[in-house]
Amino acid sequence: MRFLDNVNMDFVAEVIGVGPAEAVAASHTQDEGYYQAASTAFEDMKYVVALLTAILLTDFASSDRGALGAGFHWRLAEPLERAKQSLMTSRATTQGARHHRHHLVVALEKLDAIAGMVRDGADMRDDPRCASVMAGLRQVVRELRTVSKLAAGFDVVNFATSCCATHAKPHQFPGNRVQSS
Amino acid sequence: MTTYSIHVVEYATAPDNPIGAFLNGKYNAGVCPILFGFIVIRGEGIVALVDAGFDWELHDKKHTSGLTVDKWESPAKVLQSLGIAPADVTHVLPTHAHFDHLGGLRYFPNAHFYMQERELSDWVWRMSLDSRFRWLTSFVDSADILECIDLARKGRFTLLKGRSDNVLPGIDLVPAFDTHTAGSQYVVVRNSARTQADSWILAGDLVYQFENLDGGDAEKPFYLPIGAASGSAFNLVMTTHEMIEAAGGDRTRVIPVHESRLAERFPSATSEYGLKVIELCLGDGHESVLPSVEARAAAASNR
Protein backbone atom coordinates (compact mmCIF):
# COMPACT_ATOMS: atom_id res chain seq x y z
CA MET A 1 0.00 0.00 0.00
CA ARG A 2 3.04 2.22 0.09
CA PHE A 3 2.35 3.78 -3.29
CA LEU A 4 -1.37 3.59 -3.63
CA ASP A 5 -1.90 5.40 -0.38
CA ASN A 6 0.08 8.32 -1.63
CA VAL A 7 -0.66 8.60 -5.31
CA ASN A 8 -0.75 12.26 -6.27
CA MET A 9 -4.26 12.25 -7.64
CA ASP A 10 -4.49 15.97 -8.31
CA PHE A 11 -1.56 15.67 -10.66
CA VAL A 12 -2.78 12.43 -12.19
CA ALA A 13 -6.21 13.93 -12.74
CA GLU A 14 -4.72 17.02 -14.32
CA VAL A 15 -2.49 15.05 -16.66
CA ILE A 16 -5.02 12.48 -17.80
CA GLY A 17 -7.89 14.95 -17.88
CA VAL A 18 -10.28 13.46 -15.36
CA GLY A 19 -11.65 14.74 -12.09
CA PRO A 20 -9.73 14.04 -8.87
CA ALA A 21 -12.58 11.93 -7.51
CA GLU A 22 -12.53 9.72 -10.56
CA ALA A 23 -8.77 9.44 -10.35
CA VAL A 24 -8.95 8.44 -6.70
CA ALA A 25 -11.66 5.90 -7.43
CA ALA A 26 -9.55 4.49 -10.20
CA SER A 27 -6.70 3.84 -7.81
CA HIS A 28 -7.56 0.34 -6.76
CA THR A 29 -5.56 -2.08 -4.74
CA GLN A 30 -5.39 -4.33 -7.77
CA ASP A 31 -2.49 -2.15 -8.94
CA GLU A 32 -0.41 -2.65 -5.85
CA GLY A 33 1.57 -5.33 -7.67
CA TYR A 34 2.19 -2.96 -10.53
CA TYR A 35 3.52 -0.20 -8.32
CA GLN A 36 5.85 -2.59 -6.55
CA ALA A 37 7.25 -3.81 -9.86
CA ALA A 38 7.43 -0.24 -11.13
CA SER A 39 9.45 0.73 -8.08
CA THR A 40 12.05 -1.90 -8.90
CA ALA A 41 12.17 -0.77 -12.51
CA PHE A 42 12.40 2.90 -11.53
CA GLU A 43 15.34 2.34 -9.18
CA ASP A 44 17.15 0.22 -11.77
CA MET A 45 16.59 2.84 -14.44
CA LYS A 46 17.86 5.59 -12.18
CA TYR A 47 20.97 3.49 -11.61
CA VAL A 48 21.48 3.02 -15.36
CA VAL A 49 21.07 6.75 -15.96
CA ALA A 50 23.69 7.43 -13.30
CA LEU A 51 26.07 4.87 -14.83
CA LEU A 52 25.66 6.35 -18.29
CA THR A 53 26.17 9.82 -16.88
CA ALA A 54 29.33 8.67 -15.13
CA ILE A 55 30.65 7.23 -18.40
CA LEU A 56 29.97 10.47 -20.25
CA LEU A 57 31.40 12.57 -17.45
CA THR A 58 34.58 10.53 -17.52
CA ASP A 59 34.84 10.98 -21.27
CA PHE A 60 34.21 14.70 -21.27
CA ALA A 61 35.41 16.19 -18.03
CA SER A 62 37.75 13.86 -16.22
CA SER A 63 41.48 13.58 -16.65
CA ASP A 64 41.31 9.99 -15.41
CA ARG A 65 39.49 7.93 -17.97
CA GLY A 66 40.42 4.81 -16.05
CA ALA A 67 38.40 5.84 -13.02
CA LEU A 68 35.51 3.63 -13.96
CA GLY A 69 37.61 0.52 -14.29
CA ALA A 70 37.32 -2.28 -16.78
CA GLY A 71 33.92 -3.74 -17.47
CA PHE A 72 32.03 -0.74 -16.23
CA HIS A 73 29.90 -0.58 -19.35
CA TRP A 74 28.96 -4.19 -18.84
CA ARG A 75 27.23 -3.23 -15.61
CA LEU A 76 24.47 -1.56 -17.60
CA ALA A 77 23.04 -4.87 -18.80
CA GLU A 78 21.81 -6.42 -15.58
CA PRO A 79 19.73 -3.55 -14.16
CA LEU A 80 18.32 -2.84 -17.60
CA GLU A 81 17.21 -6.42 -18.00
CA ARG A 82 15.70 -6.43 -14.51
CA ALA A 83 13.79 -3.24 -15.27
CA LYS A 84 12.45 -4.78 -18.48
CA GLN A 85 11.35 -7.92 -16.68
CA SER A 86 9.69 -5.93 -13.90
CA LEU A 87 7.67 -3.87 -16.33
CA MET A 88 6.88 -6.69 -18.73
CA THR A 89 5.49 -8.93 -16.02
CA SER A 90 3.48 -6.21 -14.30
CA ARG A 91 -0.06 -5.28 -15.18
CA ALA A 92 -1.50 -1.83 -14.69
CA THR A 93 -5.27 -1.77 -14.70
CA THR A 94 -6.37 1.66 -13.53
CA GLN A 95 -5.97 4.73 -15.67
CA GLY A 96 -3.51 6.32 -13.25
CA ALA A 97 -1.33 3.24 -13.15
CA ARG A 98 -1.45 2.83 -16.92
CA HIS A 99 -0.39 6.40 -17.35
CA HIS A 100 2.43 5.86 -14.87
CA ARG A 101 3.51 2.72 -16.71
CA HIS A 102 3.42 4.50 -20.06
CA HIS A 103 6.08 7.01 -18.97
CA LEU A 104 8.24 4.28 -17.47
CA VAL A 105 8.07 2.28 -20.68
CA VAL A 106 8.99 5.31 -22.80
CA ALA A 107 11.96 5.96 -20.52
CA LEU A 108 13.02 2.33 -20.58
CA GLU A 109 12.91 2.05 -24.36
CA LYS A 110 15.00 5.18 -24.71
CA LEU A 111 17.43 4.03 -22.06
CA ASP A 112 17.85 0.68 -23.74
CA ALA A 113 18.69 2.36 -27.02
CA ILE A 114 21.23 4.67 -25.37
CA ALA A 115 22.87 1.83 -23.48
CA GLY A 116 23.28 0.01 -26.78
CA MET A 117 25.19 2.98 -28.16
CA VAL A 118 27.69 3.30 -25.33
CA ARG A 119 28.00 -0.30 -24.27
CA ASP A 120 31.05 -0.90 -26.44
CA GLY A 121 33.14 1.46 -24.36
CA ALA A 122 34.03 3.88 -27.12
CA ASP A 123 35.15 7.34 -26.10
CA MET A 124 32.00 9.38 -26.56
CA ARG A 125 33.95 12.58 -27.15
CA ASP A 126 34.82 11.35 -30.61
CA ASP A 127 31.57 9.59 -31.28
CA PRO A 128 29.09 11.26 -33.64
CA ARG A 129 26.26 9.68 -31.68
CA CYS A 130 27.17 11.72 -28.61
CA ALA A 131 24.58 14.42 -29.26
CA SER A 132 21.79 11.88 -29.51
CA VAL A 133 23.02 10.10 -26.39
CA MET A 134 22.90 13.37 -24.45
CA ALA A 135 19.49 14.30 -25.84
CA GLY A 136 18.20 10.81 -25.11
CA LEU A 137 19.41 10.89 -21.54
CA ARG A 138 17.73 14.23 -21.02
CA GLN A 139 14.49 12.76 -22.30
CA VAL A 140 14.83 9.80 -19.95
CA VAL A 141 15.40 12.16 -17.02
CA ARG A 142 12.28 14.12 -17.99
CA GLU A 143 10.23 10.92 -18.15
CA LEU A 144 11.53 9.77 -14.77
CA ARG A 145 10.63 13.13 -13.27
CA THR A 146 7.11 12.75 -14.62
CA VAL A 147 6.93 9.26 -13.15
CA SER A 148 8.05 10.64 -9.80
CA LYS A 149 5.24 13.19 -9.88
CA LEU A 150 2.58 10.59 -10.60
CA ALA A 151 3.04 8.56 -7.44
CA ALA A 152 4.80 8.78 -4.12
CA GLY A 153 7.82 6.61 -3.47
CA PHE A 154 9.46 7.36 -6.83
CA ASP A 155 12.04 9.92 -5.79
CA VAL A 156 14.55 11.11 -8.37
CA VAL A 157 16.82 12.34 -5.59
CA ASN A 158 16.80 10.72 -2.21
CA PHE A 159 16.10 13.83 -0.15
CA ALA A 160 15.40 11.74 2.93
CA THR A 161 19.06 10.97 3.39
CA SER A 162 20.45 14.02 1.72
CA CYS A 163 22.79 16.39 3.54
CA CYS A 164 21.34 19.66 4.81
CA ALA A 165 17.89 18.83 3.52
CA THR A 166 17.60 15.90 5.89
CA HIS A 167 14.08 16.09 7.10
CA ALA A 168 12.69 16.13 10.59
CA LYS A 169 10.01 13.52 10.04
CA PRO A 170 10.88 10.36 11.95
CA HIS A 171 11.90 7.51 9.70
CA GLN A 172 10.38 4.20 10.63
CA PHE A 173 12.65 1.23 10.25
CA PRO A 174 11.13 -2.16 10.99
CA GLY A 175 11.13 -2.70 14.72
CA ASN A 176 12.44 0.67 15.77
CA ARG A 177 10.80 3.02 18.23
CA VAL A 178 10.23 6.44 16.78
CA GLN A 179 10.23 9.35 19.13
CA SER A 180 9.54 12.83 17.86
CA SER A 181 11.97 15.43 19.04
CA MET B 1 40.48 49.36 -0.77
CA THR B 2 37.62 46.87 -0.66
CA THR B 3 37.22 45.13 -3.98
CA TYR B 4 33.99 43.19 -3.74
CA SER B 5 30.53 43.54 -2.29
CA ILE B 6 29.32 40.26 -0.85
CA HIS B 7 25.68 39.41 -0.21
CA VAL B 8 23.80 36.31 0.84
CA VAL B 9 20.60 36.21 -1.19
CA GLU B 10 18.11 33.76 0.23
CA TYR B 11 16.06 31.84 -2.34
CA ALA B 12 14.31 29.28 -0.13
CA THR B 13 13.82 28.24 3.44
CA ALA B 14 13.28 24.89 5.09
CA PRO B 15 11.56 25.20 8.46
CA ASP B 16 12.22 22.01 10.38
CA ASN B 17 15.56 20.34 10.12
CA PRO B 18 17.15 18.10 12.73
CA ILE B 19 19.95 19.86 14.54
CA GLY B 20 21.80 16.55 14.69
CA ALA B 21 22.45 16.87 10.96
CA PHE B 22 24.27 20.11 11.57
CA LEU B 23 25.99 19.59 14.92
CA ASN B 24 27.72 16.27 15.33
CA GLY B 25 26.24 14.24 18.16
CA LYS B 26 23.31 16.55 18.98
CA TYR B 27 20.83 13.86 18.08
CA ASN B 28 18.03 14.90 20.41
CA ALA B 29 18.41 18.66 20.18
CA GLY B 30 15.27 19.24 18.15
CA VAL B 31 14.89 21.05 14.89
CA CYS B 32 15.80 24.41 13.44
CA PRO B 33 15.15 26.40 10.28
CA ILE B 34 17.77 26.71 7.57
CA LEU B 35 18.11 29.08 4.69
CA PHE B 36 19.11 28.27 1.15
CA GLY B 37 21.02 31.10 -0.43
CA PHE B 38 23.31 32.27 -3.17
CA ILE B 39 26.38 34.12 -2.04
CA VAL B 40 26.93 36.87 -4.59
CA ILE B 41 30.35 38.46 -5.03
CA ARG B 42 30.32 41.61 -7.14
CA GLY B 43 33.09 43.93 -8.23
CA GLU B 44 35.64 44.59 -10.98
CA GLY B 45 33.12 43.56 -13.63
CA ILE B 46 32.61 40.18 -11.97
CA VAL B 47 29.35 38.74 -10.73
CA ALA B 48 30.25 35.44 -9.09
CA LEU B 49 27.92 33.10 -7.24
CA VAL B 50 29.03 30.63 -4.66
CA ASP B 51 26.80 27.65 -5.47
CA ALA B 52 24.09 27.36 -8.07
CA GLY B 53 21.14 26.60 -5.80
CA PHE B 54 18.53 24.03 -6.72
CA ASP B 55 15.75 23.88 -9.22
CA TRP B 56 12.61 23.35 -7.23
CA GLU B 57 10.54 23.85 -10.38
CA LEU B 58 11.73 20.46 -11.59
CA HIS B 59 10.78 18.65 -8.42
CA ASP B 60 7.30 17.82 -7.30
CA LYS B 61 6.66 20.23 -4.45
CA LYS B 62 4.03 18.39 -2.50
CA HIS B 63 5.03 14.92 -3.37
CA THR B 64 8.73 14.72 -2.77
CA SER B 65 9.46 12.77 0.34
CA GLY B 66 12.13 13.83 2.76
CA LEU B 67 12.30 17.55 2.09
CA THR B 68 10.09 20.36 3.22
CA VAL B 69 10.89 23.58 1.43
CA ASP B 70 8.89 26.74 1.61
CA LYS B 71 9.17 30.09 -0.14
CA TRP B 72 11.39 28.86 -2.99
CA GLU B 73 11.81 31.58 -5.59
CA SER B 74 13.73 31.50 -8.87
CA PRO B 75 17.14 33.16 -9.28
CA ALA B 76 15.54 35.68 -11.66
CA LYS B 77 13.31 36.93 -8.85
CA VAL B 78 15.68 36.90 -5.90
CA LEU B 79 18.69 38.37 -7.71
CA GLN B 80 16.56 41.40 -8.59
CA SER B 81 17.33 42.54 -5.05
CA LEU B 82 20.86 43.27 -6.20
CA GLY B 83 19.71 44.69 -9.52
CA ILE B 84 21.09 41.77 -11.49
CA ALA B 85 19.67 39.01 -13.66
CA PRO B 86 20.86 35.40 -13.92
CA ALA B 87 22.32 36.24 -17.34
CA ASP B 88 24.62 38.77 -15.66
CA VAL B 89 26.31 36.07 -13.60
CA THR B 90 29.82 35.58 -14.96
CA HIS B 91 31.09 32.79 -12.71
CA VAL B 92 29.61 30.11 -10.47
CA LEU B 93 31.72 28.37 -7.84
CA PRO B 94 29.83 25.26 -6.67
CA THR B 95 31.23 24.12 -3.35
CA HIS B 96 30.09 20.54 -3.93
CA ALA B 97 27.76 18.41 -6.02
CA HIS B 98 24.73 18.06 -3.79
CA PHE B 99 21.41 18.87 -5.41
CA ASP B 100 21.00 22.17 -3.53
CA HIS B 101 24.38 23.46 -4.64
CA LEU B 102 24.54 22.17 -8.21
CA GLY B 103 20.89 21.90 -9.20
CA GLY B 104 20.50 25.40 -10.61
CA LEU B 105 23.17 25.27 -13.33
CA ARG B 106 20.69 25.83 -16.13
CA TYR B 107 19.65 29.20 -14.76
CA PHE B 108 22.97 30.88 -15.54
CA PRO B 109 23.44 30.86 -19.30
CA ASN B 110 26.60 32.95 -19.46
CA ALA B 111 28.51 31.72 -16.44
CA HIS B 112 31.68 29.68 -16.25
CA PHE B 113 31.73 27.00 -13.54
CA TYR B 114 34.61 25.82 -11.34
CA MET B 115 34.54 22.66 -9.25
CA GLN B 116 37.01 20.26 -7.75
CA GLU B 117 37.58 17.35 -10.11
CA ARG B 118 37.66 14.95 -7.18
CA GLU B 119 34.07 15.79 -6.31
CA LEU B 120 32.97 14.26 -9.58
CA SER B 121 35.65 11.60 -10.05
CA ASP B 122 34.88 10.15 -6.63
CA TRP B 123 31.20 10.06 -7.53
CA VAL B 124 32.13 8.16 -10.68
CA TRP B 125 34.29 5.76 -8.68
CA ARG B 126 31.50 5.20 -6.19
CA MET B 127 29.16 4.45 -9.07
CA SER B 128 31.49 1.60 -9.94
CA LEU B 129 30.67 -0.10 -6.65
CA ASP B 130 27.71 -2.41 -6.37
CA SER B 131 24.26 -1.41 -5.16
CA ARG B 132 25.07 -2.03 -1.49
CA PHE B 133 27.14 1.16 -1.64
CA ARG B 134 24.38 3.30 -3.12
CA TRP B 135 24.14 5.57 -0.07
CA LEU B 136 27.46 7.01 -1.20
CA THR B 137 25.92 8.26 -4.43
CA SER B 138 22.36 8.99 -3.38
CA PHE B 139 22.86 12.72 -2.73
CA VAL B 140 23.73 13.55 -6.30
CA ASP B 141 21.13 14.06 -9.01
CA SER B 142 22.32 12.53 -12.29
CA ALA B 143 20.47 15.29 -14.11
CA ASP B 144 22.83 17.82 -12.54
CA ILE B 145 25.83 15.82 -13.73
CA LEU B 146 24.32 15.75 -17.22
CA GLU B 147 24.26 19.55 -17.07
CA CYS B 148 27.93 19.52 -16.05
CA ILE B 149 28.76 17.36 -19.05
CA ASP B 150 26.91 19.70 -21.33
CA LEU B 151 28.78 22.67 -19.88
CA ALA B 152 32.09 20.82 -20.29
CA ARG B 153 31.28 20.20 -23.95
CA LYS B 154 30.73 23.92 -24.35
CA GLY B 155 33.98 24.81 -22.58
CA ARG B 156 32.17 26.44 -19.65
CA PHE B 157 33.09 23.95 -16.94
CA THR B 158 36.52 23.75 -15.37
CA LEU B 159 37.53 20.94 -13.05
CA LEU B 160 40.23 21.92 -10.62
CA LYS B 161 42.93 19.67 -9.24
CA GLY B 162 43.32 21.04 -5.74
CA ARG B 163 43.90 24.57 -4.54
CA SER B 164 43.53 27.31 -7.15
CA ASP B 165 44.55 30.80 -6.12
CA ASN B 166 43.24 33.80 -8.02
CA VAL B 167 40.67 31.87 -9.99
CA LEU B 168 39.23 35.35 -10.09
CA PRO B 169 41.23 38.37 -8.87
CA GLY B 170 41.69 37.92 -5.11
CA ILE B 171 39.43 34.86 -5.01
CA ASP B 172 40.84 31.43 -4.18
CA LEU B 173 39.21 28.01 -4.27
CA VAL B 174 40.51 25.70 -1.57
CA PRO B 175 39.73 21.97 -1.50
CA ALA B 176 38.52 20.21 1.62
CA PHE B 177 38.78 16.59 0.58
CA ASP B 178 36.83 13.87 2.38
CA THR B 179 34.86 16.23 4.56
CA HIS B 180 31.18 17.00 3.89
CA THR B 181 31.75 15.33 0.54
CA ALA B 182 34.72 13.80 -1.26
CA GLY B 183 35.70 16.94 -3.11
CA SER B 184 34.16 19.90 -1.31
CA GLN B 185 35.79 23.28 -1.67
CA TYR B 186 35.51 26.60 0.09
CA VAL B 187 35.98 30.09 -1.29
CA VAL B 188 38.40 32.67 0.05
CA VAL B 189 37.76 36.27 -0.94
CA ARG B 190 40.81 38.43 -0.19
CA ASN B 191 38.98 41.69 -0.24
CA SER B 192 41.61 44.25 0.64
CA ALA B 193 44.01 44.82 -2.22
CA ARG B 194 43.96 41.05 -2.61
CA THR B 195 45.83 40.47 0.62
CA GLN B 196 44.76 38.25 3.51
CA ALA B 197 43.51 41.25 5.45
CA ASP B 198 39.77 41.67 5.17
CA SER B 199 39.26 38.11 3.97
CA TRP B 200 35.91 36.34 3.83
CA ILE B 201 35.56 32.59 3.84
CA LEU B 202 32.49 31.22 2.10
CA ALA B 203 32.27 27.79 3.58
CA GLY B 204 29.58 25.91 1.65
CA ASP B 205 28.41 23.02 3.82
CA LEU B 206 31.71 22.62 5.66
CA VAL B 207 30.02 24.48 8.47
CA TYR B 208 26.26 24.73 8.85
CA GLN B 209 25.85 26.80 11.97
CA PHE B 210 27.82 29.22 14.12
CA GLU B 211 28.23 26.46 16.70
CA ASN B 212 30.37 24.48 14.25
CA LEU B 213 32.90 27.28 14.63
CA ASP B 214 32.86 27.71 18.40
CA GLY B 215 30.99 24.74 19.86
CA GLY B 216 28.43 27.16 21.26
CA ASP B 217 31.01 28.40 23.74
CA ALA B 218 32.28 31.84 22.75
CA GLU B 219 34.56 32.04 25.80
CA LYS B 220 36.28 28.72 25.29
CA PRO B 221 35.57 27.95 21.65
CA PHE B 222 36.09 24.55 20.10
CA TYR B 223 35.42 23.12 16.70
CA LEU B 224 32.28 21.01 16.48
CA PRO B 225 31.97 19.23 13.12
CA ILE B 226 28.76 19.00 11.15
CA GLY B 227 26.68 15.86 11.49
CA ALA B 228 25.86 15.23 7.84
CA ALA B 229 29.01 14.14 6.08
CA SER B 230 30.23 11.33 3.89
CA GLY B 231 33.83 12.09 4.78
CA SER B 232 35.72 12.41 8.02
CA ALA B 233 34.82 14.41 11.14
CA PHE B 234 38.54 14.77 11.76
CA ASN B 235 39.03 16.40 8.37
CA LEU B 236 36.06 18.71 9.05
CA VAL B 237 37.61 19.89 12.32
CA MET B 238 40.97 20.52 10.67
CA THR B 239 39.30 22.34 7.77
CA THR B 240 37.35 24.52 10.20
CA HIS B 241 40.61 25.56 11.80
CA GLU B 242 42.15 26.19 8.38
CA MET B 243 39.22 28.40 7.34
CA ILE B 244 39.34 30.48 10.52
CA GLU B 245 43.07 30.92 10.07
CA ALA B 246 42.47 32.04 6.49
CA ALA B 247 40.09 34.64 7.91
CA GLY B 248 42.87 36.01 10.08
CA GLY B 249 41.48 34.22 13.15
CA ASP B 250 38.08 35.93 12.96
CA ARG B 251 35.47 33.17 12.93
CA THR B 252 32.69 35.66 12.16
CA ARG B 253 34.28 35.97 8.72
CA VAL B 254 33.56 32.28 8.01
CA ILE B 255 30.10 32.22 6.46
CA PRO B 256 27.84 29.17 6.79
CA VAL B 257 25.40 29.63 3.95
CA HIS B 258 22.59 27.58 5.54
CA GLU B 259 22.75 29.47 8.86
CA SER B 260 19.39 31.22 9.32
CA ARG B 261 20.88 33.47 12.02
CA LEU B 262 23.19 35.21 9.54
CA ALA B 263 20.50 37.89 9.27
CA GLU B 264 20.93 38.60 12.97
CA ARG B 265 24.68 39.00 12.71
CA PHE B 266 24.88 41.12 9.56
CA PRO B 267 22.72 43.94 8.16
CA SER B 268 19.75 42.49 6.30
CA ALA B 269 16.39 43.23 4.76
CA THR B 270 13.40 41.09 3.83
CA SER B 271 12.29 41.17 0.22
CA GLU B 272 8.76 41.18 -1.17
CA TYR B 273 9.06 37.39 -1.34
CA GLY B 274 9.65 37.13 2.39
CA LEU B 275 13.26 36.12 1.76
CA LYS B 276 16.34 37.72 3.29
CA VAL B 277 19.08 39.72 1.64
CA ILE B 278 22.11 39.81 3.92
CA GLU B 279 24.88 42.31 3.35
CA LEU B 280 28.23 40.94 4.44
CA CYS B 281 30.29 43.80 3.05
CA LEU B 282 30.29 46.58 0.48
CA GLY B 283 32.99 47.19 -2.08
CA ASP B 284 34.38 50.65 -2.64
CA GLY B 285 31.86 52.81 -4.47
CA HIS B 286 29.00 50.38 -3.90
CA GLU B 287 25.87 51.46 -2.04
CA SER B 288 23.84 49.31 0.27
CA VAL B 289 21.01 47.46 -1.51
CA LEU B 290 19.03 47.05 1.70
CA PRO B 291 17.00 50.30 1.49
CA SER B 292 15.80 49.44 -2.01
CA VAL B 293 14.93 45.89 -0.93
CA GLU B 294 12.84 47.29 1.92
CA ALA B 295 11.22 49.88 -0.34
CA ARG B 296 10.19 47.24 -2.88
CA ALA B 297 8.84 45.02 -0.13
CA ALA B 298 6.82 47.92 1.29
CA ALA B 299 5.45 48.80 -2.14
CA ALA B 300 4.45 45.19 -2.74
CA SER B 301 2.64 44.97 0.59
CA ASN B 302 0.69 48.15 -0.20
CA ARG B 303 -0.56 46.78 -3.49
Image (cartoon, coloured by chain):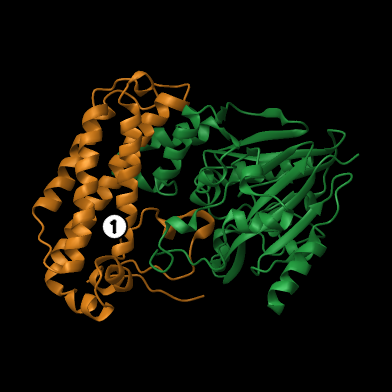
Chain colours: A orange, B green
How far across and how far down the image is residue A11, in percent? 32, 68
Q: Is residue B128 visible?
A: no
Residue at image coords 66%, 65%: B275
Rendered location of residue A163, percent (x, y): 51, 54
Q: Total marks drawn?
A: 1
In the image, B72: left or right of B294?
left
Amino acid type of the residue that numbered disc 1 sits on in the rendered structure: Val
Image coordinates of residue A44 in percent, x first then y, are 25, 47
Q: From what the image shows, is residue A16 above or below residue A44? A: below
Instruction: Give the structural element (helix, strand or loop) at label 1.
Output: helix
Q: Is residue B196 left or right of residue A19?
A: right
Q: Please, which residue is most extreme toward the front here? A: B303
Q: Quadrant of residue B236?
A: top right
Query: Residue lying furthest right in this view?
Result: B1
Report the side of A148 relative to B51 (left or right).
Answer: left
Q: Nearer the viewer, residue B213 or B104?
A: B104
**Is B56 displayed left or right of A46 in the figure?**
right
Q: What residue is drawn where x is 22% and y is 60%? A: A100
Residue that badge 1 annotates: A147
Chain of the residue on which disc 1 is drawn: A
Q: Residues within 10 Å of mark 1 (few under 14, many from 20)?
A: many
Please identify the quadrant where the N terminus of chain B is shown.
Answer: top right
Depth check, front residue: B213 or A125? A125
Q: Residue furthest top?
A: A126
Residue B19: quadrant of the picture? bottom right
Q: Residue at x 42, y 38 (%)?
A: B146
Q: Quadrant of the C terminus of chain B?
A: bottom right
In the image, residue B8 lies at what x, y percent? 71, 54
The answer, for residue A62, to whether it is visible in the render is yes
Picture quadrant of residue A129: top left
Task: Identify the residue at image location x=28%, y=68%.
Answer: A12
